[in-house]
Each structure stands twice: as structure tokens, then as C-alpha cells.
Amino acid sequence: MAGLQQTNSEMILLSWVRQSTRNYPQVNVTNFTTSWSDGLAFNALLHSHRPDLFEWSTVASQQSPVQRLDHAFNIARQHLGIEKLLDPE
């Protein structure tokens, strides 16, 4: 049952992320691994809830995946109080 509950929770969370990022054509979240590796999903999720924090077009078009991930983690830490738990490298 624990595995089923986790799977259901993951599906709900994935659905929420997809809903939150649906207006970002460059972002296609299908899982919790490879869909996040280019940094676009993290930034889109932040931008969808706090568009005042940064310009989406700048992040989406001008930075490398590592820079985009670092940007998202820094924005989350500085403005939302979410500690950086992952290293973009």
C-alpha cells in the first residue's frame, strides 16, 4: 500500500506541476527526473507563481541548463526561503 500511495502522491504532484507550467511551451514535464535537467521546469514553476521575480524570456533563451538551475535555486532561496538542496552540477 505504501508504494501505491507514493505513486498516487507523485501523480498528483506531477499533475499540479504540469498545470502550473502549461503556459510555457518550452516546458514539458513528464517525470521527476529528466524533465527537470535543463532548468526550465524549475524556473517555469517559480515564474508561474511569482512572475514578478524575473523575466521568463531571459532565463529561457539565454542561459545554459546549469545557469538556469542555479538561477531557479537562487530565486527560491532569496525570495521564497527555500534552501538549496541540490547542486546544479
Image (cartoon, helix red, strand yellow):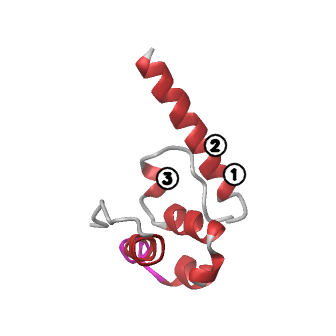
Location of the C terminus (image quadrant)? bottom left
Give the residues in magenta: 63-68
User: What residue is disc 2 on?
Assistant: 15
Q: Nearer the viewer, mark 1 or mark 3?
A: 1
Q: Pick out the residue farthest to the front.
A: 81
Within 10 Å of disc 3 (Cα), the crowding (few <14, some 14-19, many 20+) is some
- The residue drawn where x is 69% and y is 51% is 19
Q: Pick out the residue farthest to the top.
A: 1
**Which amino acid does the dot numbered 1 rest on?**
Gln
Most common secondary structure along the magenta stretch:
helix
Within 10 Å of disc 2 (Cα), the crowding (few <14, some 14-19, many 20+) is some
Q: Pick out the residue farthest to the right.
A: 23
Distance from Cα at disc 2 to Cα at disc 1 = 6 Å
Location of the N terminus (image quadrant)? top left
Q: Nearer the viewer, mark 3 or mark 2?
A: 2
Decide if residue 48 is on the left or right side of residue 80.
right
- 6 w.r.t. 43: above or below: above
Q: Position of residue 29 (x, y in %)?
A: 57, 51
Q: Is residue 67 magenta?
A: yes
- The residue drawn where x is 60% and y is 71% is 47
Within 10 Å of disc 1 (Cα), the crowding (few <14, some 14-19, many 20+) is few
Count numbered badges in the picture.
3
User: What residue is disc 1 on?
Assistant: 19
User: What residue is disc 3 on?
Assistant: 35
- Do tag 2 and tag 1 residues touch (Cβ < 8 Å)? yes
- The residue drawn where x is 53% and y is 33% is 9
Q: Is residue 82 magenta?
A: no
